[in-house]
Each structure stands twice: as structure tokens, then as C-alpha cells.
Image (cartoon, rainbow, N blue to C red):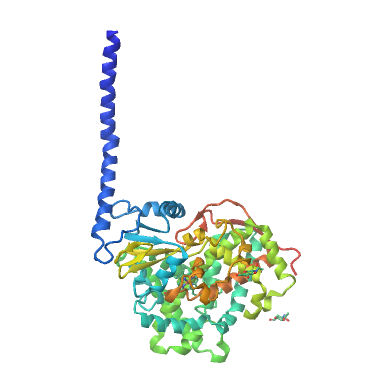
Amino acid sequence: MLIDFIYSVYSYIFSCYVLYWGLVIVGCPAIVHVLIKFCWNYYITLWCVTDNELSHLPIPPGTLGYPFIGETIEFIRKNDRFYKSRQDKYGSVYRTHVLGRPTIRVSGAHNLRKILMSENSYVSSQWPPSIRKVLGPYALSMMDDIHEHKERKRLLINLFLPDALNDHIPIIRKTIKHFIDEWCQKGKILGYPQCRNLAFIMAAKCLAGFECDNEMGNELSTIYQSMIHNMFSLPIELPGFGLYKALKAKKQLIQRISENIQKLQNIPVDDRKGVSALDFLLREEDENCRFKTCESIVELMFASHDTTSSAMCSCLMFLGKYPNVIKKVREEIGSDDLDNLTLNDFPKYKYAYNVTKEVLRMTPPVGAGYRKVLKSFQLEGYKIPKGWTVAYGIRDTHHTSPLYTNSDVFNPDRWDDLPNFDRITPDNLETRYNYATFGGGPRTCIGKDFAKLVLKLFVLHVCKSCDWKLENKDAELYYIPVPRAVDGLPLVVQKRKNND
Ligand code: HEM
Ligand SMILES: *[C@@H]1O[C@H](CO)[C@@H](O)[C@H](O)[C@H]1NC(C)=O
Ligand SMILES: *[C@@H]1O[C@H](CO)[C@@H](O)[C@H](O)[C@H]1NC(C)=O
């Protein structure tokens, strides 16, 4: 009895010790942890709201993570799941803290329209300082002055009007066919790096007028890659730092483009007609604007490269998973000769177009757009505070919109019954933002028609001339900076036998 008693007293004291030290070792940091998070949240929501406007409205729900780093690590690690879990918990407007800024993430057609149509009144475009510095003040996406932006955009849009696009078609086709032939010869390829290469060569030819034989292509590509890799870096312009390297690479790129312009200018105008976007700019802008022209070309190459390559690779992935879709594309092509297509012939390939649309809905290359809030405004009863960042979620919208049944399933046939959002009509002013692959409003993607054209040609040619198999059908997707299969999408490619 007694021994039992003493034993239980001892064990009681022992367990208290364990509990005590357990609390000290595990509990206290947990409490400190909660306290730090709480104070940070309190600080941001109270002190980083600098105006008194709409003060009767609450800030959107959500969490802000740890001081300074916010939720950036979780955002990078989980990415897609990061948004999904928050969307499930908080709905279509919530707060978070990523990439050094307090951010409100919004989704849904109504909210997207509000953000995109409020450019310059409530929001303005926002880019990290290092990217601003590299792309420079003449880049369209960096121009803050609305009038300057509008004027520049009106000039550059000429590069993508139907006549110009028709001139691009033979170059795009030739490049795509060259790559497909190479893939068939190799037999085994990694889809993602190959599509990146293809997209780069295409941009260098169409947008910068380079011939891009192999040597030239490789050299240019090396310079360009050096710019891209070092672009997302700390804004410190000293030797050894990323930004310094990126700026050096950009200088070299501008030098090459400038030399190329000189070369093109020596060719008689009639002979060089339609060679590239350059020609148009050369006609419009005088010698003094040479630098501006070169800057624009660098921006266009930058904006088109990652986006189109991700989209092409996603086409290979989804089509590889759904052989019946390839079959339907082939039925639509029938025995057509694809080598003489012009823009006027494309309406015939509606199904192939819907395939590209569905690919862009499932994995939009640009997952979200970022804006700085200039003036507090209201959204769904919440206050969106001045000075914060607001991110309009493209992917989130595509995957939660009530318009798309089973929105996580790749299904090009869904477009049979959906309105066509390509044109703005009085009755789709809001609904068309359910499909926001190319943004909207004054900052709409300037290259969207070019991108659509490239993707249509890519799908038609790849379905017509080769068979391919995914080596890993369940590869996970990674979304930063653009969606891609984690394993680079290994493929086995074969020339089609009964082709022609
Ligand atoms: C599938 C391919 C593409 C996608 C998904 C895409 C997507 C987008 C999106 C969403 C925006 C708006 C960003 C924002 O609101 O902040 C944008 C802007 C832009 N895009 Fe694209 N893009 C693609 C291809 C291209 C191509 C091929 C070019 C050029 C040849 C291009 C040039 C630009 C430029 C210059 C802007 C900035 C426009 C401005 O600020 O006024 N894009 N793009
Ligand atoms: C397509 O163009 C090629 C040369 O560019 C020409 O030889 C061929 O006859 C054309 N085919 C058709 C069907 O027009
Ligand atoms: C493609 O989508 C459009 C709407 O965007 C639809 O009208 C058309 O029927 C679809 N065509 C095919 C062949 O799926």
C-alpha cells in the first residue's frame, strides 16, 4: 500500500516535471510563435493601413504568417495548394503576405473585372524593383503614365494585327516543323526544355528579325538566359549581384538587336517586308528612337517566351493524357495541307482552337496579375487598403468559376456550350472574366493574338505529324514561375506513319 502510495506520488511529481519541461521545451516556443504571429498580424492590419477611408469596413480575412517573410515560404513550397486551402477557408477575397508585401488575393469574374477596370483610378501595375530596372522605363508593362502607356501600346499593337500575323505564319510554321522533325529523329526528349527552346527561337525570329541559324541561336539564347536567370534578384546593382549580371546581359542583347537592325536597314524595303516585328518599328520610329525600339523588343521577347513555352508544353501534356482529343483534332484536319494556311483558314479548325483554349484554362501560364492599391476601395464588403498589393487570381478563377462544371477536368468539349469570350459584347461584360488567361482592361496582353496563333499552329502540326507518349502520366505540376511538369515532361516521339 505505502509503497504504492509513495510510488504514485513520485510518479505524479515525475509527470509534473515532464509536463513542465515539456512545456518549456515545446510549449514556450509554440506560445512565442503564436504571439509573434499575432503581433505581426496586428501590426500589419492596424499600422499598415494608412488612411481612414472606409474605416467602417473590415480588412478581408486571412493570415499573414511571420514578420517580414510573411507566408512566402509556404507560398513557394505549396503554391497551388496554398491558394486552394485559403480559397476553401476564406472565399474569393482574402489577405496574405507574400514576396515582402501585404497582399489581398481576389478571384471570380466580378472581382477581376473590378480590379482590371480600375487601372489608374484605384490600382496601378506593380513589378519588383529588379525587374523594373532590367526591363527599363520604355517597357510597356513598366509605364506608369497612362497617356504614355496608351500611345506606346497603340503603336506596338500594329505588330499583332491580322496583316502582321499573316506575315508571321510561315516563320512560325517553319520553326515548329523543324523542331518536330528533330524530336522525331531523337525519339526521346524532355518536353519542357524543348518547348522553351522552340519558343525562344520563334520569338527571336518573329519579334527581333534574327535568322537564328544554330550558332547564332545558341549564342543569343545564352545571353538571354543570363538576363532571365538573374532578373528576379535583390535590387543591388554591384558586381557579383544578380541584378548587375542581368543588366550586363541586357546590354549585350540590345547591342545584338541594334546590329541586326542596321543589317536589316541595308536590305531594300520591299525585300524585307514581313520579316519581323522590327520592320514595322523601323518604319515608325526614327534613328533617335533606336534604343526605345530595342527595349521594346527585349520586353516582347521576355513576355512571350516563358508564357508560350509553358502553354505549348501543357498542350503536349494534356493531349498526351487524352488520346481521344488527338483523334478528334486529326479528324478535323482530315487530309488538309497545313502548309499553306493563312489567318482566313483558321476558323475551320474550331475544335483545335477549343483545345488550346481549354489548355490555357487549365494551366494559364500567368497565374495571377499584381497591382498596387492607389486608393482604398470596397470589394465584397471588405476594405482593400491603400498601399497594399492586390493580386487578381487567374488560375483560381478558372478553377472555381461556376461556369465550368468539373472545373479540374480537362475537357475541350465544354466549350461547345459556353459563350465565346473572344469578343466583347454588351452581354458578356462581366462573364468573360471567367476566362482571364490574357488579363483584361488597359493592361490586356498585347501579344494574345500572336500567342493564340502560335498555339493553334503548334497543336495542328504536332497532331498531324507525330505520335507521342508521356513517360510519366502523373507528373506533378509546379507553378513558379510558369506551370510545368516537375520532371520536365519526358516524351517518346515518333513520326506518324500514315501521314500524307
Ligand atoms: C500564352 C501566352 C501568354 C499569356 C498567357 C500571357 C498573359 C498575359 C497577361 C495575363 C498579361 C497581363 C498582366 C497584368 O495584368 O499585369 C500580359 C501582359 C503582357 N503581355 Fe502577355 N501573355 C502571353 C503571351 C504574350 C506574347 C506572345 C507577348 C508578346 C509578343 C506578350 C506581351 C505582353 C506584354 C507586352 C504585356 C504588358 C501589357 C501592358 O502592360 O499593357 N504576351 N500577358
Ligand atoms: C502550297 O505552297 C507551296 C509552296 O509554298 C506550293 O508548292 C503548293 O502548291 C501549295 N499548295 C496548295 C495546296 O496550295
Ligand atoms: C468551340 O467553342 C465554341 C465556343 O467558344 C463553340 O461555339 C463551338 O461549338 C466549339 N466547337 C467545337 C468543334 O468544339
**Residue 142, position in %: x, y?**
37, 74
**Residue 301, position in %: x, y?**
47, 73
- Please indicate whether residue 6 sits to the left or right of residue 289 in the image: left
- At x 70%, y 69%, the residue is 332
- Please indicate whether residue 267 sits to the left or right of residue 238 in the image: right
**Vertical position of residue 321 compared to residue 304: above or below:** above
**Vertical position of residue 470 compared to residue 139: above or below:** above
Quadrant of image for the C terminus: bottom right
Q: Is residue 413 visible?
A: yes
Q: Is residue 219 visible?
A: no
Ligand 3 quadrant assignment: bottom right
**Residue 305, position in %: x, y?**
49, 69
Residue 69 position by quadrant: bottom left
Judge by depth and name the residue closer to the eye, 220 or 20: 20
- Please indicate whether residue 158 sits to the left or right of residue 291 in the image: right
Quadrant of image for the N terminus: top left
